């Protein structure tokens, strides 16, 4: 470790691994360290032993759950948006040979006490119980507006100005009912609160377009998912980095940073060793005195089931969104459901991960509406995560810190953070050019 590097990266979460992978490919000499004995940091997938050790110290997993190696339980429940930014990064780097993706089989939304599939085809839309006949016609007008919208052609704007009119005004223009607004804003635009209603409509419309585009790519749902769990994503970038000379060390304690006379970071200490560097990148857990709480706390419950989720046509994987309005909350509740067909649990089991932003002193009570949808549970492991962000942008001391993974259901905010960090570090926007055509598609 007593060497000189261009960049030292602390923590092997997805954000850090994408950056170290890209910088290795760009020819930087990268050292990547994790104090834990496995890859993935806060975005790891854990085996049974690791899972129980983290969430229920002192207790072992029941034997009936099967073998350790059959389990890869994600610490953050997110799916990959098929048409989103992470997919762009995946396809424009050289990580695809290390990954195998599958589709998530459906997306469901909670309305008036029950769940229904978010239609992914015209046929499903016509049959959907989510709307009555007349509301379906109004909704169709809205989706035609979204589909035909062209920035340069005013005749497609329906008299609306997406930078001035709020989303509420757009809903009113098409006469959409409150339940339909919840559905569009939360199950398609994937907002976690209702704050978007009073904002200019553009971002919501863009999100709906991205959702429809993602569904259109593979059908069924807008999401794809890597076999063996999300922890495969950082590992794929780590493998790519290694091909370009990146050095990886797991299980390595970090004992502090060293600074030069100008206050810029110049080394990372581990025991008696010091590795020299010009830049340090890392996740918030490595820099307690350089980060602050965002004020948001997230509850995540990993629920082991022995049956598919009721009322979902026995799907092997899906997302359920409970819009906040429907259960008198301020933040949506998400449930990510996976099964042994994704190699994240043993045969005969299903894994449901419930998450939401905490609003009261009794977070476990807040997620009860989700449990009601799941039926009997085999075991439940719960954790609460405080979210952190850096105090400074890192340009002063050259220590660049990522944000904690938030409560959204996908990686779009994570890739925003990657791009933001890359810009702060290099002064240039992140541009990925495809080196060679990807041979594998999801
Ligand atoms: C599960 O995790 C433990 C602790 O990190 C590790 O020692 C063990 O090898 C893992 N088991 C498998 C099958 O990967």
Image (cartoon, helix red, strand yellow):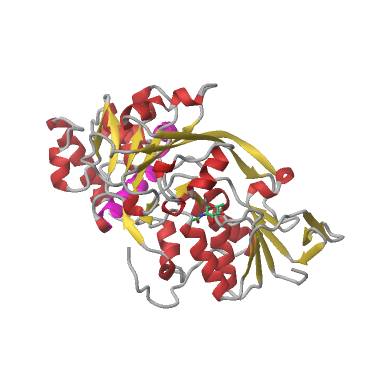
Q: Residue at the location (78% across, 56% down)?
A: 257
For the N terminus, the image quarter is bottom right
User: Can residue 223 be seen at all in this image of the molecule?
Assistant: no
Residue 389 image point, x, y percent: 62, 44
> Nearest the camera: 373 or 179?
373
Q: Which residue does the image show at 56% across and 61% down from the upper left?
A: 17
Image x and y of residue 232, in percent: 46, 59
Q: Position of residue 263 (x, y in %)?
A: 82, 56
Q: x, y (%) of residue 78? A: 43, 47
> In the image, is 157 to the left or to the right of 71?
left
Asked if the stretch drawn in magenta spans residue 203, the answer is: yes
**Depth check, front residue: 291 or 355:** 355
110 lies left or right of 79: left
Write down the region rendered in magenta.
193-217
The overriding secondary structure of the stretch rendered in magenta is helix
Toward the front, the furthest residue is: 63
- Quadrant, the C terminus: bottom left
The residue closer to the viewer here, 305 or 135, is: 305
- Residue 291 counted in the magenta span: no
In this view, 422 is above or below 437: above
Q: Image check: 302 left or right of 280? A: left
Q: Residue furthest bottom?
A: 436
Residue 233 visible at all: yes
Give 286 or 54, whichever is nearer the viewer. Answer: 54
């Amino acid at each position: 470790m007593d060497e000189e590097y261009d960049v030292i990266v602390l923590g092997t979460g997805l954000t850090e691994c994408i950056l170290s992978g890209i910088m290795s490919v760009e020819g930087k000499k990268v050292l990547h360290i994790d104090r834990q004995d496995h890859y993935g940091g806060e975005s790891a997938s854990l085996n049974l032993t690791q899972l129980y050790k983290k969430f229920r110290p002192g207790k072992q997993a029941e034997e009936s759950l099967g073998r350790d190696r059959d389990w890869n339980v994600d610490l953050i429940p997110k799916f990959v948006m098929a048409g989103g930014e992470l997919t762009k990064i995946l396809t424009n780097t050289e990580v695809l040979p290390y990954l195998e993706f599958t589709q998530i089989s459906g997306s469901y939304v909670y309305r008036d006490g029950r769940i229904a599939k978010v239609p992914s085809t015209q046929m499903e839309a016509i049959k959907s119980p989510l709307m009555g006949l007349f509301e379906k016609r109004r909704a169709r007008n809205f989706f035609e507006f979204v589909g035909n919208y062209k920035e340069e052609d005013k005749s497609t704007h329906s008299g609306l100005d997406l930078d001035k009119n709020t989303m509420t005004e757009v809903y009113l223009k098409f006469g959409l009912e409150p339940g339909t607004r919840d559905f569009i804003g939360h199950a398609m635009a994937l907002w976690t609160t209702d704050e978007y209603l009073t904002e200019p409509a553009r971002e919501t419309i863009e999100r709906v377009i991205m959702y429809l585009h993602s569904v259109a790519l593979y059908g069924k749902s807008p999401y794809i998912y890597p076999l063996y769990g999300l922890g495969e994503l950082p590992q794929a970038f780590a493998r790519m980095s290694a091909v370009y000379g990146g050095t990886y060390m797991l299980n390595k304690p970090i004992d502090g940073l060293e600074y030069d006379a100008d206050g810029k970071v110049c080394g990372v200490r581990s025991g008696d060793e010091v590795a020299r560097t010009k830049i340090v990148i890392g996740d918030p857990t490595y820099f307690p005195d350089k980060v602050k709480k965002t004020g948001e706390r997230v509850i995540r419950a990993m629920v082991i089931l022995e049956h598919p989720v009721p009322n979902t046509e026995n799907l092997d994987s899906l997302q359920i969104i409970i819009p906040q309005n429907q259960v008198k909350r301020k933040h949506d509740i998400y449930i990510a459901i996976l099964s042994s067909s994704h190699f994240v649990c043993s045969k005969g089991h299903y894994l449901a991960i419930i998450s939401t932003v905490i609003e009261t002193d009794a977070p476990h009570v807040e997620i009860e509406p989700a449990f009601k949808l799941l039926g009997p549970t085999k075991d439940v492991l719960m954790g609460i995560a405080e979210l952190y962000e850096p105090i400074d942008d890192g340009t002063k001391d050259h220590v660049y810190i990522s944000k904690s993974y938030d409560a959204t259901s996908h990686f779009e905010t994570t890739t925003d953070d990657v791009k933001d960090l890359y810009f702060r570090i290099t002064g240039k926007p992140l541009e990925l050019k495809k080196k060679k055509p990807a041979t594998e598609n999801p």
